[in-house]
Amino acid sequence: MGRTARNIDMAGTRRKGPGPFIVGILNVTPDSFSDGGDFLDPEAAAVHAASMLDEGAGMLDVGGESTSPGSDSVPQEEEIGRVVPVIERVLALRPEAVISVDTYRSGTATAALEAGASLVNDVTARRGDPSMVSVVGEAGCPVILMHMQGEPKTMQKEPHYKDVVREVKNFLAERAEYAGDAGVGPENIIVDPGIGFGKNLEHNLDLLRNLDAIVDLGFPVLIGASRKRFMEWITGVQEARDRVSGTVATTVLAYERGATYFRVHDVRANREALAVAEAILHSPRR
Ligand code: HH2
C-alpha cells in the first residue's frame, strides 16, 4: 500500500489550521444525480480530475456508486472496476493528487487504497460494512464519517427528527468514538452532517445554520451540499448543473461557521468564493 495517510497532514486541517480545502467530486457512475455518465471512461475522468486540481481542488473524491435519493446499489466488483482504473489513471497523470474513495464497502476501500487512494469517505459512517473498521484502522488513513438517516433508496420518503442538530451531533460523536476504539486516531477523523441524506429542507437548513454545534465536536467538518435538490426547493432551479450559485452560498456560510472541507462539483466558483470569504474574515485590519 504505497500511498496512505502518510501523504496528508491531517493535523494541519484543524479548524484554526490551514484550509479551507476544496474536495473535487469525481463520480464514475452512470446514474449520479448531476454528472452521471460524464466520467465513466478513465481517460475522461483523469482529464477532469486534472482540471479540478488546476482550479484549486486540494483533494479529489472518487465514487463508483451513486448514493443520491432512490439510487440502487451496485455489486462490489463493479464498484471496484469503476474506481480503481480511474484512481490509477489520475495518479499516473498527477502523482501529487490526494484521492479519497467514496465507498461504504471495505473491499472497495482496500482496493482503492492499494491503487493509491489516501483516505476513505464512508457515507454510512462504518455502519454499512463492519470490516471497514479494520481496513481503515490498519491502513492508518483518514476517514470521513457522515450522518445518514435510512438508506439511499428510501431515505427521502419521510425523514424525521425531534432535534436534527442534536441527533446528528450525537450520532457523529458516537461514530467517532467507535472509530477511535477501533484504532482510528482522532487526527484521522473528519465528520460530515450529510446534507440531503435523509433530511428535508428544514433539516438541511437547520444543520447548515447551526453548523457550529457540529464543529464543536473538535473534528474537521466536511460539507457536501453541492448542487443538491434542496436548492431547487428554494430557488426553483431544476437543472442540477445550474445550482452553482446556491452551492457557493452554502460553501461560504459553512466556512464562516467553521467547516474545513467542501465537497463540490464546481471547483473554480467555490474556490474563488472561499478566497474572498477568507480575505473578508481573516485579512489583518489596516
Ligand atoms: N454526497 C454525495 C455523495 N457522497 N459524501 C460525503 N461525505 N458527503 C456528502 O454530502 C456526499 C457524499 C451525493 O452527491 P454526488 O456524489 O454528487 O451524487 P451521487 O451520490 O448521485 O453520485
Image: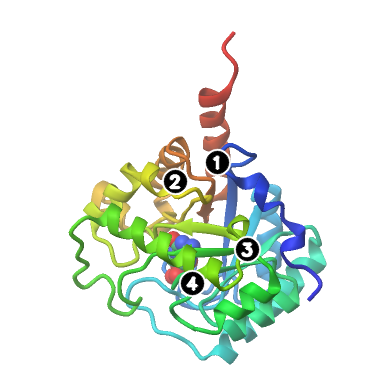
Position of 5 relative to 213 (above/below)? below
Position of 92 relative to 259 (above/below)? below
User: Which comes sooner in the sequence, label 3 or label 1?
Assistant: 1
* Location of residue 181 by image quarter: bottom right
Task: Name the residue tied to disc 4.
Answer: 36
| Image location of residue 29, percent across then percent down | 53, 76
Q: Are marks 2 and 1 in contact (CB under 8 Å)?
A: yes
Q: Rate crowding at label 3 as few (under 14), some (14 to 19) or many (20 or more) other CA atoms within 10 Å.
A: many
Task: Name the residue tied to disc 2.
Answer: 215
Residue type of the residue flagged with mark 2: Val
Residue type of the residue flagged with mark 1: Arg
Spatial CA distance of label 3 from label 4 is 27 Å
User: Which comes sooner in the sequence, label 4 or label 2?
Assistant: 4
Q: Rate crowding at label 1 as few (under 14), some (14 to 19) or many (20 or more) other CA atoms within 10 Å.
A: some
Spatial CA distance of label 2 from label 1 is 8 Å
Q: Is residue 117 left or right of residue 67?
A: right
User: Which comes sooner in the sequence, label 3 or label 4?
Assistant: 4
Image disc number at residue 15: 1
Residue type of the residue flagged with mark 3: Pro
Spatial CA distance of label 4 from label 1 is 33 Å
